[in-house]
Image (cartoon, rainbow, N blue to C red):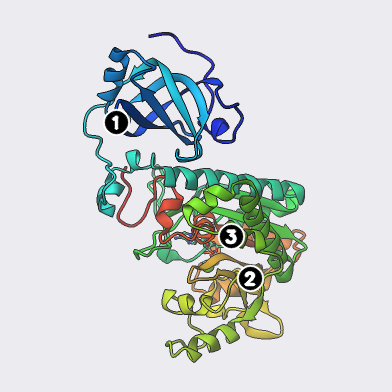
Amino acid sequence: MVKMTGFIDVADILKGDNEDGAEVKVRGWIYTSRSSGGIQFLELRDGSGVIQCTLNKRNIDAETFSRVEKLPLETALEMKGKVKEDNRAPGGWEIRVNEIGNVYESKLDYPIVKKEQGIEFLMDNRHLYIREPKLQNIFQIRAKFLQAARDWFKENGYTEVQTPMFMTASVEGGSTLFSVEYFERKGVYLSQSWQLYAEALISSLGKIYTIAPSFRAEPSRTRRHLSEFLHMELEEPWSTLSDIQNSGDRLVCHMANTLAEVMPEKVKAVGRDPDYLASLKAPFPKITYDEAVEIVQSKNIEMFWGDDFGWQQEGPLTEEFETPFWVVGYPSGIKPFYHMPDPKRAEVTLSSDLLAPEGYGEIIGGGQRVHNYEQLYQRTLDDGLDPANYAWYMDLRKWGTVPHSGFGLGVERVLMWMLKLDHIRDTVPFPRDMRRVYP
Ligand code: 4AD
Ligand code: MG
């Protein structure tokens, strides 16, 4: 065994960075292995990609050959060999191995096998299952998605801010609050949204955004709810409802177009046609809440004016569209106290959700905020809240209060739709829901 240095990433080989016949060193984990007629085929996974490596009895000493043949799956090892373009190999390239370096041998019987395994088993073994190439692709896309968002925010003059996760008041209603033990103090919760703090920070920093976890004690098990999700939120002073819809259109299109441009193969491998993401253009269509209710009712699905959309309503509604679309003007009764009532029609608010097509449903929720002190005071009472719990938030309305708006985008919801996934869980390495906080 020789000490090897100068390893390269599998991704660089697959990109064609090395000439046919060049000598390379790689290291990674054995993802699959089989042997036939004096040749061993290993698929090696190094975090950047997966490549086929072959060992031929004629090119490598007998001892190394038989040692490698006995290595269990997920053994990690270093190898040296020559790259060969070969269209029979997955990815189009293989490495013809002539030397082995360090070997970190696995135990026998790696629990994740190729044959169908039940979802509960795979979730119990999530710490291992995250090695699967499909998940690896999704997580790489997720990282690029966040990078594209940060680029867009920077380009458009927003400042990134973080706000506390421990809070003393609800933002999105008491029913989904997680209480925490906070030393001796009662009435401390995990954040559902940065919004209250964001409304304070716009008077310090102007246009701002955050990318941070939010927590919801969602009592239902659905394919699109997590109890911990990544929340991308923006807040803008001097901004109306239509201004933030415009920001949402451009942000979502920028992220979709970027994924299609920089990682089309990964997007395709996961299950979405990259041309679809490339084709999305601002602005997205808008319909009113009233029109949305009529569409749902026309499909003989039960819904009354004033009801919120559940998945039974949102699914069929969103099947009418091919791109995301805004539903505008939700009734006050189904939106939290901070939403500005429409001056022309008091029973609805200047609020809007962006719904993704194909049954995916809500991906953004936001709107214009109440900026008048008396009106906000009244709205807290109407919502059955104790204004004392919102004292500092209402104080903001006394000191240079201006029209302002913002929204929250669910990162996992958007990825689920953009990648055409059946379930939200695979957009996160270790998903948290009602039944799962392990591993
Ligand atoms: O519609 P929501 O509740 O709005 C707010 O929290 C506002 N305060 C945001 C703001 O204006 N700054 O949540 C915003 C988005 C939803 O549209 C959805 O995409 C996502 O957050 N979301 C969830 N994603 C996964 N699992 C859950 N349980 C989610 N709850 C909300
Ligand atoms: Mg919402």
Give x and y (percent) for residue 24: 52, 20
Q: Mark 3 or mark 1, which is nearer to you?
A: 1
Q: Earlier in the sequence, mark 1 or mark 2?
A: 1
Q: At x 42% / y 29%, what residue is drawn? A: 53
Mark 2 C-beta closer than 8 Å to ligand 1: no
Element at label 3:
strand
**CB atoms at circles 3 and 2 under 8 Å apart?**
no
Q: CA distance from mark 3 to mark 1?
A: 52 Å
Q: Earlier in the sequence, mark 3 or mark 2?
A: 2
At label 2, counting other C-alpha atoms closer than 10 Å, the crowd grade (few under 14, some 14-19, many 20 or more) is many
Residue labelled with disc 2: 376
Where does the N terminus fall, quadrant-wise?
Answer: top left
Image quarter of residue 21: top right
Element at label 2:
helix
Element at label 1:
strand
Q: Earlier in the sequence, mark 3 or mark 1?
A: 1
Q: Amino acid at mark 2?
A: Leu
Residue 162 in view in this figure = no
Residue labelled with disc 1: 35
Q: Nearer the viewer, residue 20 or 4?
A: 20
Mark 3 C-beta closer than 8 Å to ligand 1: yes
At label 3, counting other C-alpha atoms closer than 10 Å, the crowd grade (few under 14, some 14-19, many 20 or more) is many
Residue labelled with disc 3: 408
Left or right: residue 240 compared with residue 25? right
Give x and y (percent) for residue 101: 40, 14
Above or below — where is 204 with respect to 287?
above
Left or right: residue 431 compared with residue 199? left
Give x and y (percent) for residue 151: 69, 46
Above or below — where is 376 with respect to 117?
below
Q: CA distance from mark 3 to mark 2?
A: 20 Å
Above or below — where is 157 with respect to 5?
below
